[in-house]
Image (cartoon, rainbow, N blue to C red):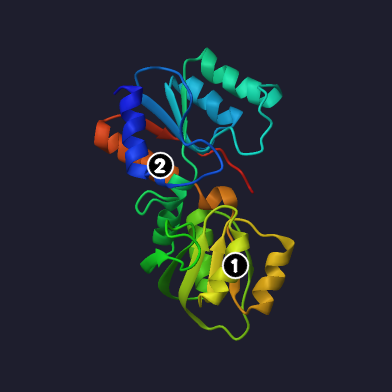
């Protein structure tokens, strides 16, 4: 398919015009006019680009691209090497950040909610109507929730349990670096808040607001949105799509 046809489709489906973000969403580096072979991944690292080159892909589709707000604008050093590799091999770089976090089907939050077996999923009130932070119902224990996450994500979680907590029925979550939303989750009545990262103060907040907290990894919690989006494109348009997971313990 033509590159512009793909971009227009993704922009419409992901509703990029309605979402204010910290980076440009859509085409970030222009390559081939025709898209036939896409490599998807979490972050447009040099390793992911190298794999795309090895596979003969014409397009890289990621969650974390380039040109973030406040980022050094010059094309030097690492950024020059990355972008130089894409241009040299005529590879498109397409990136969607918050639109891939919040999409109700292919989004990181939606996919993590499915992995945790949540029901009655909705946006956490008072944060963002697009669903930057989600809430849902489960029927488990704190230990059971950690076990589900560790088995599904293949990593050990950082966790602290709220006092006298037994059955867990209501949780909230935000993939990636969402630890700052823990207070809103607690005030909304969530028993446990799940995100990717943890800060020093997060544990104190969890203890003092009596809410369980689980940090399951920024990379680990954000693998599944871009993977699901790529699988959809393969099914919808018959494109060759390879998801490449570049390991990252963060």
* Residue at 74% across, 62% down: 200
Q: Which mark is residue 168?
A: none
Q: Which mark is residue 17?
A: 2
Q: Label 1: few (<14), some or many (≥20) within 10 Å?
A: many
Q: Nearer the viewer, mark 2 or mark 1?
A: 2
Dot 1 falls on a residue whose secondary structure is: helix
* Residue at 37% across, 42% down: 229
Query: Residue 247: where, in percent of width, then height?
Result: 58, 41
Query: Residue 86: where, in percent of width, then height?
Result: 53, 20
C-alpha gap between disc 2 and disc 1: 28 Å
Q: Which mark is residue 182?
A: 1
Query: In the rendered view, would you say 172 is above or below 191?
Result: above
Query: Residue 19: where, in percent of width, then height?
Result: 45, 47
Query: Residue 214: where, in percent of width, then height?
Result: 59, 65
Dot 2 falls on a residue whose secondary structure is: helix
Q: Is residue 196 visible?
A: yes
Residue lying at the far top of the rendered structure: 88
Relative to 147, 77 lies left or right: right
- Nearer to the camera, 11 or 59: 11
Q: Is residue 157 visible?
A: no
Residue 67, by quadrant, is top right
Residue lying at the far right of the rendered structure: 200
Residue 64, by quadrant, is top right
Q: Label 2: few (<14), some or many (≥20) within 10 Å?
A: few
Earlier in the chain: of badge 2 and badge 1, it is 2
Residue lying at the far bottom of the rendered structure: 164
Relative to 239, 83 lies left or right: right
Contact, mark 2 vs mark 1 (Cβ under 8 Å): no
Which quadrant is the N terminus positioned in? top left
How many labels, in total? 2
């Amino acid at each position: 398919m033509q590159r512009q046809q793909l971009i227009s489709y993704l922009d419409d489906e992901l509703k990029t015009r309605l979402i204010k973000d910290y980076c440009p969403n859509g085409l970030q580096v222009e390559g081939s006019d025709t898209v036939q072979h896409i490599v998807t991944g979490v972050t447009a690292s040099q390793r992911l680009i190298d794999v795309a080159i090895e596979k003969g892909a014409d397009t890289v589709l990621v969650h974390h691209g380039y040109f973030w707000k406040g980022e050094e604008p010059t094309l030097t050093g690492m950024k020059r090497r990355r972008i130089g590799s894409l241009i040299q091999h005529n590879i498109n770089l397409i990136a969607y950040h918050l639109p891939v976090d919040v999409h109700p089907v292919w989004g990181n939050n939606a996919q993590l909610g499915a992995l945790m077996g949540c029901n009655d999923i909705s946006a956490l009130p008072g944060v963002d109507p697009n669903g930057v932070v989600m809430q849902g119902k489960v029927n488990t224990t704190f230990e059971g929730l950690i076990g589900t996450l560790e088995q599904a994500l293949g990593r050990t979680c950082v966790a602290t349990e709220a006092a006298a907590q037994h059955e867990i029925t209501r949780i909230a979550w935000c993939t990636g670096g969402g630890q700052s939303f823990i207070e809103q989750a607690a005030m909304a009545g969530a028993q446990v808040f799940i995100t990717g990262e943890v800060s020093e103060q997060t544990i104190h907040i969890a203890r003092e607001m009596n809410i369980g907290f689980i940090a399951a990894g920024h990379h680990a919690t954000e693998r599944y949105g871009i993977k699901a989006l790529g699988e959809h494109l393969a099914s919808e348009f018959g494109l060759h799509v390879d998801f490449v997971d570049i390991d990252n313990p963060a």
